Image (tube, helix red, strand yellow):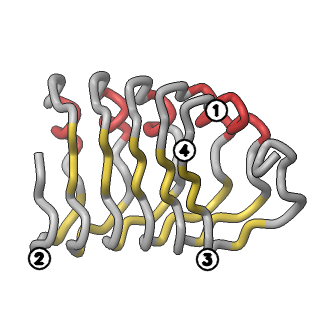
Amino acid sequence: LSLAWNSLTGVIPSSIGNLSNLEILIASNNMISGVLPAEVGDLSVLEVLELGLNKLSGLVAPPISRLSQLEYLGLSYNNFHGVIPSSMGNMENLKIISLESNFLSGSIPATLSHLSQLGQLSLSNNHLQGEIPSYIGG
């Protein structure tokens, strides 16, 4: 399902969880607001979630952490806040995480070191603190 580069507004409806065979959801470059509904976590075969350049807010977890097949997570240029959930380290299929330009705080979770397929981690322009984990660049 690709809805990118439109002028869509409003929130992601909870009925999104009914699309049980959805593998790709791209709705970037719109004006979608609100929080990610918990039902996003019901998309058990979702491999690509790209919602960058919207007006989404709230926490990144918990629905995201339930997407066990996810390979690409793109939530950049939104208004997400809070910490990067350590449970993302259990999403073993993740290859790309794009969370730049939000309001994320705290440290980079050590659990991301469990993501053996991770090839790109974009966290710039947030409010992260602490040491750079040894698994990055080592």
Task: Name the side, left or right, on which 52 lies relative to 16.
Answer: right
| Amino acid under disc 3 | Asn
Q: Give the Cα separation between the discs numbered 2 and 4.
A: 31 Å
Residue type, label 4: Gly
Q: Name the residue under label 4.
A: 119
Residue 39's place in the image compared with 92, above or below, is: below
Left or right: where 5 falls relative to 31: left
Give how far across and how far down residue 97 sits, in percent: 50, 50
Nearer-N-terminus badge (1/2): 2
Q: Which amino acid does label 2 sit on?
A: Ser
Tell me the mark number nearer the camera, choosing from 1 and 2: 1
Mark 4 closeness class: few <14, some 14–19, many ≥20 residues within 10 Å: few
In the rendered image, which residue does mark 2 sit on? 7
Q: Do labels 1 and 2 touch, CB within 8 Å?
A: no
Above or below residue 67? Residue 52 is below
Mark 2 burial class by Cα count in 10 Å: few <14, some 14-19, many 20+: few
Q: Mark 3 points at which residue?
A: 125
Work out which residue is located at the far front of the displayed protein and give it. 138
Where residue 129 appears, as percent x and y from the top left, is 82, 66
Tag 2 and tag 4, C-beta contact below 8 Å: no
Q: Which amino acid does label 1 sit on?
A: Gly
Name the residue carrying label 1.
89
* Viewer-nearest residue: 3 or 79: 3
- Pointer 3 local density, CA inside 10 Å: few below 14, some 14–19, many at least 20: some
| Picture coordinates of residue 102, whole percent (x, y) | 54, 71
Spatial CA span between label 3 and label 4: 19 Å
Q: Which residue is drawn at the image coordinates 61% and 63% (left, top)?
A: 123
Looking at the image, tell me whether mark 2 or mark 4 is earlier in sequence order: 2
Q: In this view, does 21 lie to the left or right of 11?
A: left
